[in-house]
Amino acid sequence: MCGIAGLWSGRSGTQIQEMVGRMTACLVHRGPDSTGYWESVEEGIALGHRRLAIQDLTSAGHQPMESRSGRYVLILNGEIYNHLALRLEVQQAGAKVSWRGHSDTETLLALVELLGLKEALKRCVGMFALALWDRERKVLSLARDRVGEKPLYFGSVAGVLYFASELKAIRAVARASLEIDRESLTLYMRHNCVPAPKSIYKGISKLMPGTVAEFISPLAAPAFARYWNARQIAMAGEANPFEGSDDMAIKRADELVKQAVASQMISDVPLGAFLSGGIDSSLIVAMMQAVGSSRAKTFTIGFNEQQYDEGKFAKKVAQHLGTEHTELYVTPREAMDAIPRLPEIYDEPFADSSQIPTYLVSKLAKQQVTVSLSGDAGDELFGGYVRYLWVSRLWKYLSKIPRPLRRKVAKALESRRLGARGSVGGNDLQNPPRFARFRERLGKIATVLDVSEPSEIYYGLVSHWKDPASLILGGSEPLTQVTNRAGWLEGGSIESHMMYLDLVSYLPDDILVKVDRAAMSVALETRVPLLDHRVIEFAWSLPLKFKIRNGEGKWVLRRVLEKYVPPALFERPKTGFGIPIDTWLRGPLRDWSAALLDKSRLSREGYFDASLVDEKWQEHISGKRNRGYLLWDVLMFQAWLESHE
């Protein structure tokens, strides 16, 4: 795991090395072990690298790395899990390679020389972002892993092409030329993150997952090529479904997840796993125990507030599996102390409040390990979110009710979400969890009653601000993967439709960003076995009955986990990885929030409709409404703006 950065000006200059040095200096947290630099003075191109040594800790793994022939120069962030098998493939093809070490970077370079970049990436099992300079063709290629575990930003600013793992590296050398993109800000207010390919800045893009971008000059538009396409995989899976029995599906899921976990346990440094005690993380840890040669190290953050605490569940699973378990119970004050760091960690506006416990558990794990496995992606691939269970059911009833009547019901439900203390919308830390969940469900139902088709229910559920263009001054919403129907699956169930959109939007733009930035801020590499592309392809071949059955999601994963952990230890309502932001904004975070949301300040800055924000703020602090998650979106932008502009 590393941080990469570079630029291509197309002209020689004495400032290039200094500029790339400033870029990589911003990425020390991603790679504290060493730094590397390469440039071609004639072409005005330079590559920079910060290394977090995971495989081949010697200097033989140093980057930027040149290929044996000298034609290619590569910087790589990530891991190629099957690189030792790929070495054999290179040798069997007759290539004469004298290996300098055992790093995956060297393997990938040899494979690129043999097959070219796109074909080489098709054979890789891994997570990565990279930049490859072809000296012979004078072409720069950028590439990203299949699902988007590793980030990569790029864009031309004042005639120079910049690229880096994080925006802060580009901002370090081009701050004066960067302008906030109000389209991106509008999308952020809907989704609590900036969806790819947009970034918060005009002219700077995120490379889409599974894509190679080829540049023939710093100013020319890149040519994009997909080496892996989630839509094609999903449609192929549904067109050629798995036809085996329940037992065969369980057996195959067991084999594939175990294979993925085993391949991702390759490391020359200490390795562990996050454990919440839920289905996905418990399954990953169970597999680690099954295939590993020693006890797995597991890490959990707990809270004393019962409705937010998963620590007690994780502890029971760890005890049953026999892991070397570490838990840390965090006070509200300790959690809130992390908030000032969030704008620097996440680098562009990001408002998934579970970013706080994710950062805290990463910090805890880093004390003992350098690599941690995660159970992310089980929900998107195997039908775990509650919305997959009830959207079609809800539409079945809604479609029979006239829309005018539904609108009246929505207003009535919204009015029932009064937040006076002690009522349904009151103090989250005093109310039992069932009331908090009931309040949340009332709100969600109210927002999706006035729809004309089930996909609109999904859109309502994944939206924060329902009309963000009215909130952002000069704002508008371009099409995204969620709204561009041309990119949707053809046919299929509403459940498959939602899972696909979550796979290509919510997962890479929110979940994977959250984990990558939190972990890399403390130089911890995270790995996601369920995103092994063979697991993804199998999941999409499974008919819906293997995912959702008898009112429960992740049916096949539950059955696999039962082979290792008693159901009583993991069967419980889904809680998520949350914190009581609603209550904190009314209490200990009130002064901080009031300063950032000050009406005159918002008017002066000119991004938000200050009156609309103030309305939500007054409703929230008075207890009249619960507007916590809407305000958190605004607060995280304001905190980012304060620290970056």
Image: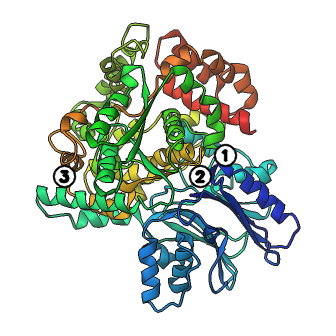
Q: Are marks 1 and 3 in contact (CB under 8 Å)?
A: no
| Secondary structure beneath label 3 | helix
Relative height, residue 79 to residue 296 (above, below): below
Amino acid type at mark 3: Phe
Contact (Cβ within 8 Å) of mark 3 with mark 2: no
**Labels 2 & 1 near each other (Cβ < 8 A):** yes
Amino acid at pointer 2: Lys
Q: From this viewpoint, which residue is outermost toward the right?
A: 14
The numbered disc on residue 181 is 1
Binning the other alpha carbons within 10 Å of mark 3 as few (below 14), some (14 to 19) or many (20 upward) gives: many
Residue 138 locus on image (x, y percent): 70, 80
**In the depicted structure, whether residue 594 falls above or below residue 288:** above
Q: Separation of disc 1 and disc 3 at Cα? A: 42 Å
Position of residue 77 in the picture relative to residue 244 (left or right): right
Task: Report the residue marked by disc 2.
Answer: 198
Quick one: 448 or 40, which is closer to the camera?
40
Q: Which residue is mark 3?
A: 546
Q: Nearer the viewer, mark 3 or mark 2?
A: 3
**Scheme of image coloration:** rainbow
- Would residue 490 be seen by someone viewing this image from the given angle? no
Of the pair 169 and 413, the residue shown nearer to us = 169
The amino acid type found where label 1 is placed reads Asp
Badge 2: residue crowd in 10 Å (few <14, some 14–19, many ≥20): many
